[in-house]
Amino acid sequence: MLQFLPYFETNPIFQVIEELAIESFSSVPLTIKKLDVLEIFSLLQSVVLRKWNQHTVQVALMCRTYNEKDYIREVLKYHYGNKVAISTLDPSSIDLLFKYEEFDLLISTDISDHKNMLIEHIPTIQVSSFPTPSELINIKHFIEQHFYGNLGIEPELIYPYGIDECPC
């Protein structure tokens, strides 16, 4: 573990843990070494990674046709796996979005429908019938922001993934 110490010493969480450990144990005859701080740091990082693996975004998928629904659902499952829990809705069932506050994201292909613009309490991402890489990246960024927002931390503090390296 010592070979990785120079890399982690620059991490702000590592520095905070080190300061807290030194300050907390200064009155007790206990010496906290860098390796001890590294072990605490790795435990904290494993907790965050466990939370990342359990994190799921509730998605409402609203499409014009059943073919679009099936295709986009499979594309989302392929790219994001267990990161998204997808519920498919018809444009006629838009009232469910207002009635239940269980969705984190609305993904819609119906760009011309102005009812989607009235939904302000749920973030909306418009995709085409065949989602492009840039549309998928927007969804990926939403998932990352949702996770870090729920956790209340900055992505740069977490190892081994940052904002650009997130394994969605």
Image: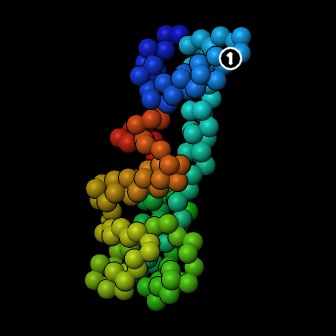
Please provide percent x and percent y for residue 74. 47, 62
Look at the picture and state if 17 lies above or below 49.
above
Work out whether residue 74 or residue 21 is closer to the camera in this orientation and state it.
Answer: 21
Please provide percent x and percent y for residue 47. 62, 37
Q: Label 1 amino acid?
A: Ser
- In the image, farthest residue toward the bottom: 92
Look at the picture and state if 32 lies above or below 154.
above
42 lies left or right of 70: right
Residue at left offset 34%, top offset 53%: 137
Please provide percent x and percent y for residue 111. 29, 78
The residue to which callout 1 is attached is: 27
Residue at left offset 38%, top offset 42%: 163
At label 1, counting other C-alpha atoms closer than 10 Å, the crowd grade (few under 14, some 14-19, many 20 or more) is few
Q: Is residue 19 visible?
A: yes
134 lies left or right of 46: left
Residue at left offset 43%, top offset 43%: 154
Work out whether residue 167 or residue 71 is closer to the camera in this orientation and state it.
Answer: 167
SS for tag 1?
A: loop
Residue at left offset 35%, top offset 41%: 164
48 lies left or right of 69: right
Work out whether residue 76 or residue 70 is closer to the camera in this orientation and state it.
Answer: 76
